[in-house]
Each structure stands twice: as structure tokens, then as C-alpha cells.
Amino acid sequence: MPIHEYECERCGAKFERLEMAGDGPAVCGSCGGPAKKLLSAPGKPRMGGPGGRETCCGMAGGCDNPKRCCGS
Ligand SMILES: [Zn+2]
């Protein structure tokens, strides 16, 4: 079963949860707030706008060569 990463929308805590069929919405283990699933893939460059240079590796401002600087 896949494990997904979640982030609490209330306190910002991050946690992982095993994805099970029939489970309800994920809730934060710290504060009980609602948590959203993170579609994070570490090292994967995010191609935003035209040219794919808007953001890279989570940095603001982008870079010239996402493939190189992201190491993937
Ligand atoms: Zn929380």
C-alpha cells in the first residue's frame, strides 16, 4: 500500500500515512486539524510557466538548468 505524505493545514505538521481504502480524511496527529495530501516528489523539478523557469527545487526565482541543479 502506498504511503503518502500529508501536511496539517492548521499547524503545518507533516506526517506520513498509509493509504487505506475506506479511510476517512487524514487528520493531524498533533492538533487534530485537517491535513492535505502532499504530492511531493523530492528532487523533481517543478515546471511552472512558459519555459519552465518559474520555480525550481522549491526555490523562488527559478534557475537556468533545473535538471542540473535539482540533481535528477
Ligand atoms: Zn496540526
Image: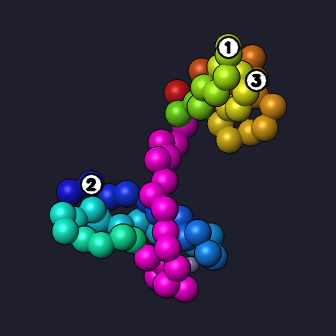
Residue at the farthest right position: 61
Residue indicated by mark 2: 2
Residue indicated by mark 1: 51
Residue at the spot 39% in from the left edge and 71% down from the top edge: 26
Q: Residue 13 falls in which quadrant of the image?
A: bottom right
Counting from the top left corner in percent of width and height, residue 48 is at 64, 27
Q: Amino acid at mark 3?
A: Cys
Image region (quadrant) for ligand 1: bottom right
Q: Residues within 10 Å of mark 3 (few under 14, many from 20)?
A: some
Do the residues bearing badges 2 and 3 touch, measured as CB atoms within 8 Å? no
Q: Residues within 10 Å of mark 1 (few under 14, many from 20)?
A: few
Q: Amino acid at mark 1?
A: Gly
Asked which secondary structure carries label 2, the reply is loop
Residue at the spot 19% in from the left edge and 68% down from the top edge: 22
Q: Amino acid at mark 2?
A: Pro
Q: Is residue 38 left or right of residue 23?
A: right
